[in-house]
Image: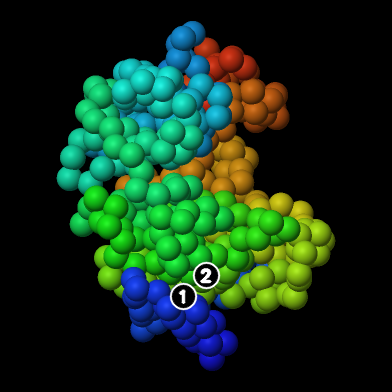
């Protein structure tokens, strides 16, 4: 704990000196999540997960999803963001029935060149699309109707809304001169008009080292979390304070704690070590964490009530356990994580899952009418509420 406090004090001192926009770090609620990837407590998937559902996203010839980058839930709607291939947002109901697509590529009013990030606007039935290329934020109603457009106040990678309407921006490596001395930090909190409230976390970006964690800024059930680059700590971002929430203590070959100066040294350490890459889902009773390992991305379930962490053994009896691959994309309701799986991967498992059976009441609905060209399938893994 002494080591953690030293790190936090360093962040506070370095980030705030000579800056006009100041904040503080609250360490009073910091929890340590200890992960021993070799000797830690391990549970089978049957113990960690109590139920699995799936949604087959309806496939239409002119509304195909290439690669899912975000999954958002609002009211009774499901927003599936494909920022790389179709550059669109496909909207479904919670049974997977297609409703409409938001797709307005271009440079005119209400149009975007890229879908850099999508946010749910708090207090309104609207989504906000960040178009980083054009420096725009474009607003649409849930039904796809264009509302308005604004210019971003400064360069940013992506942002999330705080419940107050203020915004937390990730600006790693941007160094926008509009921000003055604050451009040396990687997190900016500003009001709805772009006026800075505070900035924090010294930006470690440099030309010869620019590794970036997978989505350092995340939002779950109204709370915004930030995990700085090459850091083992997860913070809660609030309107006037940054609260240290979790310290991820990987006890074996933790790359974050190893000395490295160059990008080559860093990647060499990843080949033989363990690293928290910012992949986590905050749930009501649990925190679901993925870490990087030489052999894959093992997952850990941290139980809030008992402060215990359990490694996923990867062994389980349910046929759908094989689709819990990589890092989940979203949280659903209280204690459910959501993974998207391409249809061709699901089809590749068909023979193995059926074995000698010709029919199975669990498998038949999944494979019925499924082709390699079908849209991805969303799997909902409900964590075991009795886990202690």
Residue in the foreground of this view, choosing between 216 and 149: 149
Relative placement, left or right, of 184 versus 147 is right
Instruction: Identify the residue at horizontal 17%, vertical 45% (top origin).
Output: 123
Say which quarter of the image contains residue 112. Answer: top left
Residue 64, horizontal then vertical, whole percent: 50, 17
Residue contact between numbered discs 1 and 2, judged by CB atoms under 8 Å: yes
Q: Residue furthest left?
A: 123
- Give me the residue at 48% from left, 30% from top: 114
Instruction: Give the crowd class for mark 1: few <14, some 14-19, many >=20 residues within 10 Å.
Output: many
Q: How is the image coloured?
A: rainbow
Horizontal placement of 25 versus 123: left or right?
right
Q: Please determine whether, in this image, residue 65 is positioned above or below residue 267.
A: above
Location of the C terminus by quadrant is bottom left
Extreme residue in the bottom direction: 2
Q: Position of residue 62 (x, y in %)?
A: 46, 9
x and y percent of residue 106 in the render? 43, 20
The residue positioned 58% from the left and 69% from the top of the image is: 231
Q: Which residue is drawn at the image coordinates 21% and 57% (left, top)?
A: 164
User: Dot 2 corresponds to which residue?
Assistant: 202
Lower sequence index among marks 1 and 2: 1
Q: Nearer the viewer, residue 238 or 263?
A: 263
Element at label 2: strand
Residue position for label 1: 15
Q: Horizontal and vertical percent for residue 314?
A: 65, 52
Q: Is residue 153 above or below residue 299?
A: above
Under tag 1, what secondary structure? helix
């Amino acid at each position: 704990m002494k080591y953690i406090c030293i790190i936090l004090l360093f962040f506070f001192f370095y980030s705030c000196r000579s800056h006009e926009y100041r904040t503080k770090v609250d360490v009073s609620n910091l929890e340590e999540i200890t992960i021993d990837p070799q000797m830690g407590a391990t549970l089978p998937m049957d113990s960690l997960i109590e139920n699995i559902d799936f949604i087959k996203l309806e496939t239409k010839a002119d509304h195909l999803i290439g690669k899912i980058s975000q999954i958002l839930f609002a009211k009774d709607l499901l927003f599936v963001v494909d920022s790389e291939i179709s550059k669109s947002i496909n909207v479904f109901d919670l049974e997977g029935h297609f409703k409409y697509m938001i797709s307005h590529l271009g440079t005119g009013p209400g149009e975007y060149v890229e879908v850099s990030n999508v946010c749910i606007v708090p207090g309104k039935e609207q989504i906000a699309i960040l178009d980083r290329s054009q420096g725009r934020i474009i607003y649409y109603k849930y039904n796809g109707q264009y509302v308005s457009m604004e210019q971003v106040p400064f360069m940013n990678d992506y942002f999330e809304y705080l419940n107050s309407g203020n915004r937390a921006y990730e600006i790693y490596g941007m160094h926008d001169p509009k921000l003055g001395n604050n451009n040396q930090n990687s997190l900016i909190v500003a009001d709805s008009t772009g006026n800075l409230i505070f900035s924090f976390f010294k930006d470690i970006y440099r030309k010869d080292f620019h590794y970036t964690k997978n989505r350092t800024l995340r939002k779950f059930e109204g709370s915004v979390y930030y995990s700085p680059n090459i850091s083992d700590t997860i913070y809660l971002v609030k309107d006037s304070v940054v609260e240290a929430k979790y310290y991820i203590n990987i006890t074996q070959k933790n790359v974050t704690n190893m000395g490295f100066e160059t990008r080559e040294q860093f990647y060499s350490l990843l080949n033989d070590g363990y690293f928290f890459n910012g992949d986590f889902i905050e749930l009501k009773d649990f925190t679901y964490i993925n870490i990087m390992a030489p052999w894959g991305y093992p997952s850990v379930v941290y139980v809030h009530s008992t402060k215990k962490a359990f490694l996923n053994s990867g062994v389980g009896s349910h046929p759908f356990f094989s689709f819990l691959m990589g890092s989940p994309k979203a949280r659903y309701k209280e204690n459910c994580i959501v993974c998207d799986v391409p249809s061709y991967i699901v089809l590749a498992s068909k023979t193995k899952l059926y074995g000698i059976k010709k029919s199975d009441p669990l498998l038949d609905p999944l494979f019925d009418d499924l082709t390699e060209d079908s849209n991805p399938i969303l799997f909902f893994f409900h964590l075991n509420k009795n886990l202690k």
